[in-house]
Structures are given as structure tokens and as C-alpha cells.
Amino acid sequence: MTEGFHDGLLIARVVLGLLIAAHGAQKLFGWFGGHGLAGTAGFFEQLGFRPGRAFAAAAGASEFAGGLLAALGLFGPVGPALVVSVMIVAAGSVHWHNGLFAATSGVEVPLLYGAVAAGLALTGPGRYSLDALTGLSALWTTELAWGALALGIAGGAANLAYWARRHAPVGATA
């Protein structure tokens, strides 16, 4: 691989990872103008995720940990898979009915975050990562990356299925 390739991976990992980690910190700690766990729990309750505090904590922790792992290039596809899982839920439960673009609160941003995270999971963290520094990069095969992504996708899909069942019209079968 060329040096520029590794530089590009570093930029993508750090930018995506830190933005997602900050988003999780908003939910968990109220940092960066966020509402903290109590405020986020109320929002999740309004969306139909009950208990709201548990779902808010799970989403915030997945974003925070997944983002930090991705930014650091640690544990290969685990961090990006956590990000994919949360973005599936965000896209399906909050943004899907608003169309594509962010200007109308559509799926554009969670789709972009999820796609970049999936790409990073499959590409690997690159030379400038804690995995490379510690020798863990040798562990992460394409098959393991796909496995991690499959678990992330399954977790997101299960969460969405739970949410959709709670939102089915009375008398509808889910």
C-alpha cells in the first residue's frame, strides 16, 4: 500500500470516530451541547424505545466506544460495527420517513456514517493505528470483519424490529 493510502485511512478513521464519539458523549454526558442521559432517555421514550434510559445508554455507549475504537484503530472492525448498528437504528426509527437529505432530517447523515464505518471495518485500520502498533492487525481478516459487521447489522435490525412492533397500528400484524 502506498503511504497516502494509510494517511487517508487515518483521516477517515479519526474524523468519523471522533464525530461519532462526540455524538455518544452528547447522549451519555451532556457534553458538546447534548442533553445527557436523562434528556436523551426522554427523547427515546417519545420515539417508543422503552425503557428509554436503557436504550439511550446503549446507543450512547455504542457511539462513544465505537467512535473511540475507530479513531484509535483499535480492535479492528469492532468499533465500526458498533457504529453501523446504531446508524441502522437511527436511520430506520428517526430519519427514514423524512426522505434522503439532511435538510429535511432524512437518512443522509446516518447512511453516510454507517457506510464509512462499514468501509473502514472492511479496509482495516491501516498502518497508523493501535492495532498496527500492537500487532493486532494480523488478527483481523476480511472474514472476521464481515462477521463483526453481520453482528452489528443483526443488532441494529433486531432493535428496529422491536421498535417497529411497538409502532404497529392497532390490529395490524407485525
Image: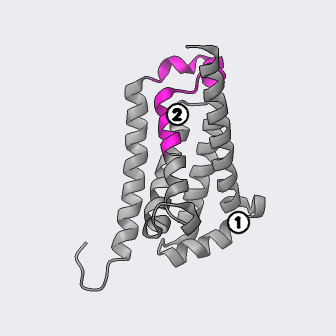
Q: What is the x, y in percent for residue 139?
A: 48, 20
Q: Secondary structure at mark 2?
A: helix
Q: What is the x, y in percent for residue 19?
A: 67, 48
Q: Is residue 31 left or right of residue 83?
A: right
Q: What is the x, y in percent for residue 81?
A: 48, 42
Q: Is residue 135 magenta?
A: yes
Residue in the image at 43% along x and 31% along y = 145
Q: Nearer the viewer, residue 54 or 164?
A: 164
Whichever of labels 1 and 2 marks the residue nearer the N terminus, that label is 1
Q: Amino acid at mark 2?
A: Leu
Q: Nearer the viewer, residue 16 or 72?
A: 16
- Are there few (<14), some (14-19), or many (20+) residues within 10 Å of tag 1? many
Q: Is residue 3 left or right of residue 32?
A: left
1 or 2: mark nearer the eye? 2
Q: Which residues are magenta?
A: 115-140
Q: Which image quarter: residue 161?
A: bottom left
Residue in the image at 49% along x and 67% along y = 94
Disc marking residue 36: 1
Q: Is residue 140 visible?
A: yes
Residue in the image at 37% along x and 56% along y = 157
Q: What is the x, y in percent for residue 87?
A: 50, 54
Q: Is residue 1 magenta?
A: no
The tally of labels here is: 2
Disc marking residue 120: 2
Q: Which image quarter: residue 37?
A: bottom right
Disc marking residue 166: none
Q: Is residue 129 visible?
A: no
The residue most toward the bottom is 170
- Quadrant assignment for the N terminus: top right
